[in-house]
Image (tube, grey):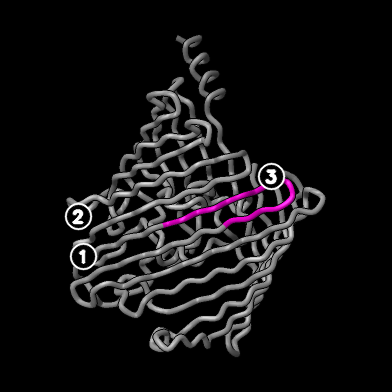
Amino acid sequence: MLIQTLSFWSQTERNVDLKLYGHIQYNLDKFDQDKNSYFSLGEQDFFVTAKLTDRISFLGETVVKYDAATSAKFAPSIERAQMKWDYFGNHSIILGKIHTPVNTWNDEYHHGRLFFPSIDRPLFFNTMVPVHTSGVALRGQYLGKLNFGYDVVIGNGISSTDIYDSSTNKALMMGMHMRPDEFTRIGVSYYNDYMPSNKPGVHSGHSTYNSGYKGALNFELYSLSIKRFTDQYEFMSETGYGVNTTDSLGRAENFSSFNYLGVKVKEVNTVYAIADYMHISDYDLHAAPGKQLKTAIGYKYEFSETCNVKFQVERTIAADNHLSHHGDLHVERYDFKFQLAYGF
């Protein structure tokens, strides 16, 4: 019995991989006449993978992050918990809570800032992207000469929690991509969720806005992603076109575009620039109407594969919700950010 137990733990240690990612950040910002300067402890990400058999594996990601509703102001959150069965070649079935693969960023980057090309996520993650889905996914990768891939996801919608969905209707996401060479990924996707009640849940970053509208809403998102990272330069473009339809105001059309360009110098240095634009329609009753344009320049230095620092200077101009239909971009914010990201 003892020999069997020791054999089990020996095999478990060999098949289970646990990593920790985190970051520490400093911000100096100016918003109208207000100025702020502060250090902050970022998300601490516990990332575990396990190979249970030759075809079955597990991926889990639990993050301890800021939560204003708790007394300690930090709380754990299960970001991913998924079982994958490679049932044939490069074709898989995934069951659990996943990052909805609507674009390259949400598919390839987890919560560890160590891997982010910039300090922050694109603006549209707070309004348009259904970040998580609890359900089942069919996935294929590296198929044929162009390394074609596909994703079909059926799961709980935006209004759901991690344990319950009050709607019998399920969200649907379909996407495909190709990797014509080792540096490039090009992908498109479509996401749809009919929400019987406009009630954002835990699977999106949409819950901070309350329009007062509680009726039904049809949420659609079309995405186009282009990424090319070589040894000399890095380029990423994430475009989103969203359509939210209600019986009250009808069709609201939203648009987002995140563009990143980095130039690598002597392998460990990257100088980069960002142009990030988002427009939420005045007719939208799900996300806060308005326009935002963020431009930034930054610098990243990599001490190693497990530690880097980034410096970023940015300017954000935004339209007030009530003036957005005039196209007035009148609110300005300036930020200087420093971030130390690590993983081990």
Q: Quadrant of residue 149?
A: top left
Kindly identify which residue carries mark 3: 306
Q: Position of residue 113 (x, y in %)?
A: 60, 54
For the N terminus, the quadrant is top left
- N-terminal of the two: label 1 or label 3? 1
Q: Position of residue 324 (x, y in %)?
A: 42, 84
Query: Marks 1 and 3, Cα distance to the nearest angstrom?
Result: 44 Å
Under mark 1, the amino acid is Ser
Magenta span has 225?
Answer: yes
Helix, strand or loop status at disc 3: loop
Task: Report the residue at 44% width, 21% height from top.
Answer: 53
Say if 28 sits above or below 135 in the image. below
For the C terminus, the quadrant is top right
* CB-based contact (under 8 Å), mark 1 and mark 2: yes
Task: Report the mark closest to the observer, 1 or 2.
Answer: 1
Helix, strand or loop status at disc 2: loop
- N-terminal of the two: label 1 or label 2? 2
Q: What secondary structure prevails in the magenta region?
A: strand
The label shown at residue 166 is: 2
Kindly identify which residue carries mark 1: 197
Q: Which residues are magenta?
A: 223-236
Task: Report the mark closest to the observer, 1 or 3.
Answer: 1
Query: Marks 1 and 2, Cα distance to the nearest angstrom?
Result: 10 Å
Task: Report the residue at 34% width, 80% height from top.
Answer: 282
